[in-house]
């Protein structure tokens, strides 16, 4: 996601704009240990190449404009959230983290 002027935009959603309403959901309100952003796409990846492709797509969707100091400046912040889920081979216990 991209955060600009306190607005959140989904970088993986084609045609997404800053006027869409997204909010950061804390662990207390979501019932999950992981913070989340409402209304954004979550993509499942199983390889490093798939993850790198998503990062490239998100980077290409960022808003950048020229300023007097920098030809490709961005006043926005990008938040990359990686949720990892796996199963322990011996105990068959599901493990999650971020």
Image (cartoon, rainbow, N blue to C red):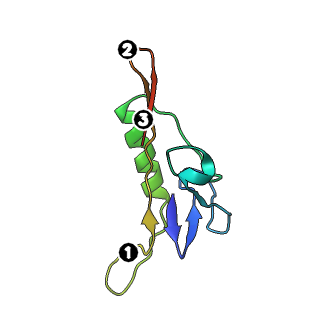
Q: Secondary structure at mark 3?
A: helix
Disc assigned to residue 89: 2
Residue pushed farthest top? 90
Asked whether the residues under the numbered discs 1 and 3 touch, taking CB atoms below 8 Å apart as contact, a structural biologist would say no
Q: Earlier in the sequence, mark 3 or mark 2?
A: 3
Residues at circles 3 and 2 in contact by the CB criterion of under 8 Å: no
Mark 2 neighbour class, 10 Å CA radius: few under 14, some 14 to 19, many 20 or more = few
Q: Is residue 3 above or below residue 15?
A: below
Circle 3 packing at 10 Å, graded few (<14), some (14-19), many (20+), is few
Residue 50: give its label. 3
Quarter of image, res 15? bottom right
Residue 25 at least partly seen:
yes
Tell me the tag on residue 73.
Answer: 1
Q: CA gap, disc 1 to disc 3?
A: 27 Å
Q: Could you tell me which residue is drawn at 61 percent across and 67 percent down?
A: 18
Which is nearer the eye, 25 or 56? 25
Circle nearer the viewer, 3 or 2: 2
- Nearest to the observer: residue 26 or residue 84: 26
Q: Looking at the picture, how far across and down is residue 29, in whole percent?
A: 62, 53
Q: Please, is residue 86 above or below residue 54 in the view?
A: above
Image coordinates of residue 56 in percent, x first then y, are: 41, 49
Q: Position of residue 7 (x, y in %)?
A: 58, 70
Q: CA distance from mark 2 to mark 1?
A: 46 Å
Reply above or below: 20 against 47: below
Q: Earlier in the sequence, mark 2 or mark 1?
A: 1
Judged by depth in the image, the label closer to the viewer, 2 or 1, is 2
Q: Residue at 43%, 75% (x, y): give it.
A: 75
């Amino acid at each position: 996601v991209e955060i600009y002027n306190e607005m959140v935009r989904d970088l993986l959603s084609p045609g997404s704009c800053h006027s869409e309403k997204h909010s950061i959901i804390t662990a207390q309100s979501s019932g999950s240990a992981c913070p989340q952003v409402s209304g954004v796409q979550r993509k499942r990846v199983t390889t490093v190449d798939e993850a790198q492709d998503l990062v490239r797509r998100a980077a290409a969707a960022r808003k950048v404009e020229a300023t007097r100091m920098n030809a490709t400046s961005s006043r926005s912040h990008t938040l990359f959230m990686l949720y990892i889920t796996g199963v322990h081979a011996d105990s068959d216990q599901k493990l999650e983290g971020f």
